């Protein structure tokens, strides 16, 4: 198979599979191919440029079988370099409670019904069975809490299908319904664990299995090798785990770029006119209307929309504004690239306008030519096909989880409008004689605030998703950020920015080890959408002032090159810090000053910790 040969070549050369190969691997659903791919990719080294290291521990109530190579293949396809550490057989509860899995980025737990059912039970005592299941759930909850007390790892659980061999062994229809109700309640309680412990996540395996129509179990392999799930089910679990890991590692996409003709509506508007396009009503118009509604739903959750269409701009604007079935109006798009230029050039221009990397884009188009041209010139862009029956377009758009986040924040919801105003700022700047005059006219206000329980999630999200202005690449998760925020030896702060065009929300964060003499910045991240205004210099001045007020004589900053954060390479020296004998460390002494820009005012907000 050509894909496997390409993967072997990459492993042999000690390099990451290229973007096109990873995209092809991401489309594989055959578990046998994923197994072979994962075994091949096990030969990758511990450090591979282009792939982000990600540690996964696996605990299972039975045998994990081919889960390890299948998971490895799906994680590499997402741009991760996984280190997968299986736990000991038949030691699930002990390994989980004692946290012997260490401190991985993610603990993937595979459960089967044996954890919740007694070895022997009576179909005539469904109430007694329900009590036993409830007790086992309490035990699991207690074990999980013990694990998160000992380790900062995120624990990924899943809902459980009730095997037909158990369900159908109950011959009373009334009792069978009661058994199913007990099992549904178990799954409800498993899903509720995410509200009880911030280090727990739960994937809804029951729903996924039903949607994909995959058998949860191979009865022969279950009896023969204690494998709780079929290869097909393991592939689905691995894919859902990949979606979570992708979000946790900050590899989710921010921008959805969309074609119009035969993508957001049926037909070519230049040929049939606004009244002739298929949009709303009966099939296929209802498919396009529902796709637009789904896109609007994504926008409401923070996905930035870009229009990329070869069309007449005035006709497109009128149609979006006036068509009674359009769910997306012109203002829904943060950038509109409607012209006759090549799509790749337009996507690159949109990325430049928004101040985002093209690697944060997902592009959906019906034309094989346009998709091929973008894939050739911008391989970092994720490409979705809108070719064929429009009834499938919504599934194509959402099933991969390109835009997944661990938790939705207020800043996420505001993001599309924030990037739309970024384009307005670009227009506003053209009327000034110098950059400094323009910046002063913006009335930029920086608001630092120490982290609280209400802002920890957003701060951790910034650590996970910021790649360009990320000084050290240390991606503090929510649990670590929360712990540091209440520690007297640490400072964790967020930074908000607003100007005459509106509130940007929380755009930056800093983590500092606060010693009596030296304050060491362990990481500092800043959203790329506020770069170019010297907000980062004002931020450095604030840190230095806080350190001096606390009696520290020195502030240390670090810069660790990642291959993607070159934009921040000169930050510390621009902020007045001096290089040291260690190339990664910069210092600001008592006699050094930070050249804070006069166009950024600082208005500190005091927060109360609970």
Image: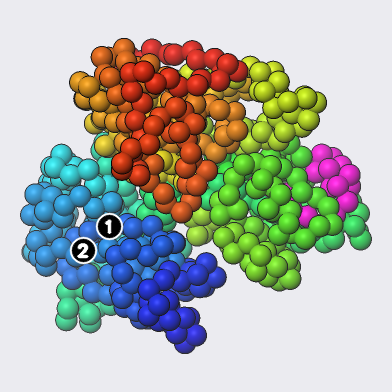
Within the image, what quadrant is residue 218 found in? bottom left
Dot 2: what SS? strand
First in sequence: mark 1 vs mark 2: 1
Give the structural element (helix, strand or loop) at label 1.
strand
Using the rendered image of the protein, determine whether residue 575 is visible from the camera's viewpoint.
yes
Q: Residue at x 34, y 58 (%)?
A: 53
Residue 37 appearing in the image = no
Q: Viewer-proximal residue, 467 or 372?
A: 467
* Left or right side of 582 for 246: right
Q: How many marks?
A: 2
Does residue 319 appear left or right of residue 574 in this picture?
A: right
Q: Residue 27 in the image: state x and y as whole percent.
A: 50, 70
Q: Which region is colored magenta?
A: 305-323
Q: Residue at x 74, y 28 (%)?
A: 429
Q: Residue at x 59, y 64 (%)?
A: 379
Which label number is shown at residue 85?
2
Q: From the top left corner, tell me how far across and down residue 166 is, in percent.
A: 22, 67
Colour scheme used in the picture? rainbow
Q: Quarter-wise, where is residue 111 in the image?
A: bottom left
Q: CA distance from mark 1 to mark 2?
A: 8 Å
Name the residue beneath numbered marker 1. 55
Q: Is residue 319 magenta?
A: yes
Q: Is residue 190 left or right of residue 410?
A: left
Above or below, comparing residue 508 to residue 83 in the picture: above
């Amino acid at each position: 198979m050509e894909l496997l040969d390409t993967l072997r070549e990459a492993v042999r050369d000690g390099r990451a599979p290229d973007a096109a190969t990873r995209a092809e691997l991401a489309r594989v659903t055959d578990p046998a191919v994923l197994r072979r791919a994962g075994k091949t990719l096990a030969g990758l080294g511990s450090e591979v440029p282009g792939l982000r290291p990600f540690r996964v521990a696996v605990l299972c109530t039975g045998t994990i079988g081919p889960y390890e190579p299948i998971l490895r293949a799906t994680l590499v396809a997402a741009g991760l370099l996984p280190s997968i550490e299986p736990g000991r057989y038949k030691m699930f509860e002990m390994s989980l409670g004692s946290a012997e899995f260490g401190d991985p980025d993610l603990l993937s737990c595979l459960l089967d019904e044996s954890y919740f059912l007694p070895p022997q039970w009576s179909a005539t005592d469904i109430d007694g069975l329900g009590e036993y299941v409830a007790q086992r759930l309490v035990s699991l909850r207690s074990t999980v809490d013990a694990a998160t007390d000992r380790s900062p790892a995120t624990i990924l659980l899943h809902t459980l299908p009730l095997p037909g061999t158990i369900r159908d062994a109950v011959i009373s229809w009334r009792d069978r319904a009661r058994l199913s109700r007990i099992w549904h309640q178990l799954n409800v309680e498993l899903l509720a664990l995410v509200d009880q412990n911030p280090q727990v996540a739960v994937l809804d395996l029951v729903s996924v299995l039903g949607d994909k129509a995959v058998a949860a179990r191979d009865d022969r392999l279950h009896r023969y090798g204690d494998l709780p799930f079929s290869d097909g089910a393991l592939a689905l679990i691995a894919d859902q785990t990949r979606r979570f890991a992708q979000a946790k590692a900050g590899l989710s996409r921010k921008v959805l770029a969309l074609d119009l003709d035969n993508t957001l509506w049926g037909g070519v508007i230049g040929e049939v006119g606004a009244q002739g396009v298929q949009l709303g009503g009966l099939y296929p118009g209802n498919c396009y209307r529902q796709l637009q509604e789904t896109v609007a739903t994504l926008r409401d959750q923070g996905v930035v929309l870009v229009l990329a269409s070869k069309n007449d701009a005035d006709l497109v604007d009128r149609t979006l504004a006036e068509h009674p079935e359009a769910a997306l109006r012109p203002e829904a798009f943060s950038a509109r690239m409607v012209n006759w230029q090549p799509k790749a050039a337009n996507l690159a221009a949109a990325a430049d306008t928004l101040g985002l990397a093209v690697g944060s884009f997902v592009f959906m188009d019906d034309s094989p030519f346009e998709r091929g041209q973008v894939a050739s010139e911008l391989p970092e862009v994720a490409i979705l096909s809108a070719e064929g029956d429009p009834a499938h377009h919504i599934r194509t758009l959402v099933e991969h989880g390109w835009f997944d986040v661990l938790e939705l924040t207020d800043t996420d919801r505001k993001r599309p409008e924030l990037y739309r105003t970024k384009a307005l700022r670009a227009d506003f700047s053209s009327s000034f004689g110098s950059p400094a005059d323009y910046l002063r006219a913006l009335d930029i206000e920086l608001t630092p605030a120490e982290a609280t329980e209400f802002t920890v999630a957003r701060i951790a999200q910034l650590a996970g998703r910021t790649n360009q202005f990320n000084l050290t690449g240390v991606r503090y998760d929510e649990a670590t950020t929360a712990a540091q925020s209440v520690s007297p030896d640490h400072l964790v702060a967020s930074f908000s920015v607003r100007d005459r065009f509106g509130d940007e929300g929380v755009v930056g964060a800093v983590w500092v080890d606060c010693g009596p003499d030296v304050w060491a910045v362990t990481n500092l991240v800043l959203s790329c959408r506020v770069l170019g205004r010297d907000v980062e210099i004002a931020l450095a001045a604030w840190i230095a002032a806080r350190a001096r007020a606390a009696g520290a004589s020195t502030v240390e900053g670090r810069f660790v090159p990642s291959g993607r954060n070159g934009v921040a390479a000169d930050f510390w020296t621009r902020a007045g810090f001096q290089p040291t004998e260690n190339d990664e460390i910069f210092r600001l002494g008592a006699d050094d000053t930070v050249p804070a820009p006069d166009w950024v005012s600082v208005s500190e907000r005091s927060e109360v910790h609970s």
